[in-house]
Image (cartoon, rainbow, N blue to C red):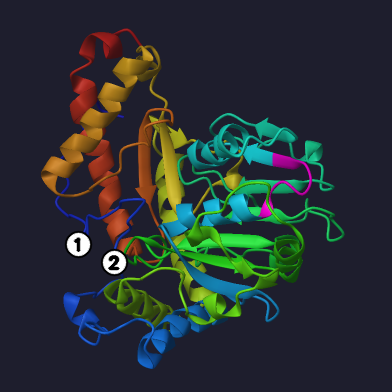
């Protein structure tokens, strides 16, 4: 490839490729919120009905089993995961699978905040999954189904036994609405509105299996639980929480936006259509990577490549020769140039990840915008690489 690629003529119509909050659905405008239930109590009948509508539409699109419970909870996906960890863990040992920043964060919380003594952390470097043969399903298991900061996902649930003794808790915030999730192999699934459907932040979703409900009703955690984490009262599930009676005050403006995204998904054709849009975006980037000599997927096994949070590493020898700090500077120079040009916002690598690019390609992203972005990546890379001419000349 030439040191400097030609400047492209076509720009993405929507340059929003952030991995969270993510791009709004195509055609979105603030007019979509015109019917929001504002200035009234969310506890009023109409308010509860809208909250319950988010639950029922989400359940239907995601094909969540009928015997599972689904709730809106505080504090986005983080709140949903923490609620699960604090409420459910401690009844037996736990294995935590950590292969990127957020799953490593759950491991840290379990060991350092919950201080569970019988906790094993099964780690893998960025680009890989942990050794799944080492997981003990007599214990509880905590994982991130899709590595938002590594671009590595679990392929399926075949490795999880149906007759497991422990619970499987899956952070699925960048997977829900973009991938098939094996609910028969999971017991807790969490996500947020701000990912695949491009909703607004601050609210999380929690889906729990009958096995998880049984744990909640039979196990008293050996720790105080904040009010926003309490799902039971007197040893019984608080059923209203799973019908739209939220633990704390939700934003009904965000609720209206979530409903707009869900209706859009339904009009497209539901989960199959959302997956197809996402996979088409991944295919466009995969084709470009295959013919580009300076970049590759961070995910080492093709089957584990995330189709939503697509993480790329820069493979040019001159880049690899730089010190880590200099690599980070060079990668950010590329993303800053793209932002300055107004063709791609917020595609820098996550702060704990290897220096590179991170492009959100979920269902709200148009494939035409992905295709338009790719020549700009070559151009920005060439512009920045030219500044490292001495290193480049030594290749």
Q: How many numbered discs?
A: 2
Q: Quadrant of residue 332?
A: top left
The one nearer the camera, 85 or 150, is 85
Q: Are marks 1 and 2 in contact (CB under 8 Å)?
A: no
* Camera-side mark, 1 or 2: 2
Q: Is residue 293 left or right of residue 8?
A: right
Q: Which residue is mark 2?
A: 24
Say above or below: 377 vs 391.
Answer: below
Q: Is residue 173 visible?
A: no
Q: Is residue 151 visible?
A: yes
**Label 1 CA crowd tier, 10 Å (few <14, some 14–19, many 20+):** few
Residue shown at 16% from the left, 36% from the top: 337
Say above or below: 312 vs 9.
Answer: above
Which contiguous range is marked in magenta? Answer: 88-95
N-term mark: 1 or 2: 1
Q: Is residue 75 left or right of residue 384?
A: right
Q: CA distance from mark 1 to mark 2?
A: 13 Å
Most extreme residue toward the front, as rendered? Answer: 234
Q: Is residue 271 left or right of residue 141?
A: left
**Residue 89 among those drawn in magenta:** yes
| Disc number placed over residue 13 in the picture, else none | 1
User: Which part of the image, by quadrant, shows the C terminus?
Assistant: top left
User: Which part of the image, by quadrant, shows the N terminus?
Assistant: top left
Counting from the top left corner in percent of width and height, residue 392 is at 29, 14
Secondary structure character of the magenta stretch overall: loop
């Amino acid at each position: 490839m030439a040191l400097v690629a030609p400047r492209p003529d076509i720009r993405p119509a929507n340059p929003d490729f952030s991995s969270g909050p993510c791009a709004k659905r195509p055609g979105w405008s603030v007019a979509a919120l015109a019917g929001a239930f504002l200035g009234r109590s969310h506890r009023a009948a109409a308010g509860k009905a809208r909250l319950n509508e988010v639950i029922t539409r989400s359940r239907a699109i995601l094909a969540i089993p009928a015997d599972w419970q689904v709730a809106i909870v505080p504090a986005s996906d983080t709140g949903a995961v923490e609620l699960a960890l604090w409420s459910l863990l401690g009844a037996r040992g736990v294995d935590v699978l950590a292969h990127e920043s957020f799953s490593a964060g759950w491991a840290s919380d379990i060991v350092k905040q919950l201080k569970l003594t019988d906790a094993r952390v099964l780690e893998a470097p960025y680009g890989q999954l942990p050794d799944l043969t080492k997981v003990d399903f007599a214990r509880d298991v905590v994982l991130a189904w899709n590595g938002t900061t590594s671009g590595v996902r679990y392929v399926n649930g075949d490795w999880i036994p149906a007759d497991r003794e422990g619970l499987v808790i899956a952070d699925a915030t960048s997977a829900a609405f973009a991938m098939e999730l094996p609910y028969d192999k999971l017991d807790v699934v969490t996500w947020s509105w701000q990912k695949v459907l491009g909703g607004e932040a601050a609210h999380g979703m929690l889906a729990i299996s009958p096995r998880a409900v049984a744990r909640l009703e039979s196990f008293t955690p050996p720790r105080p639980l904040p009010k926003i984490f309490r799902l039971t009262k007197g040893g019984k599930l608080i059923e209203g929480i799973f019908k739209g009676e939220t633990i704390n005050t939700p934003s009904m403006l965000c609720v209206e936006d979530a409903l707009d995204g869900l209706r859009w998904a339904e009009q497209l054709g539901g989960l199959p259509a959302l997956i197809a849009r996402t996979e088409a975006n991944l295919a466009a980037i995969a084709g470009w990577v295959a013919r580009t000599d300076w970049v590759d997927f961070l995910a080492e096994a093709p089957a584990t490549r995330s189709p939503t949070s697509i993480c790329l590493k820069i493979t040019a020898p001159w880049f690899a020769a730089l010190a880590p700090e200099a690599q980070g500077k060079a990668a950010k120079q590329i993303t800053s140039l793209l932002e300055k040009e107004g063709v791609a916002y917020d595609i820098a690598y996550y702060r704990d990840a290897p220096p590179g690019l991170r492009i959100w390609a979920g269902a709200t992203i148009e494939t035409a915008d992905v295709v338009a972005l790719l020549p700009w990546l070559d151009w920005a890379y060439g512009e920045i690489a030219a500044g490292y001419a001495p290193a480049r000349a030594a290749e």
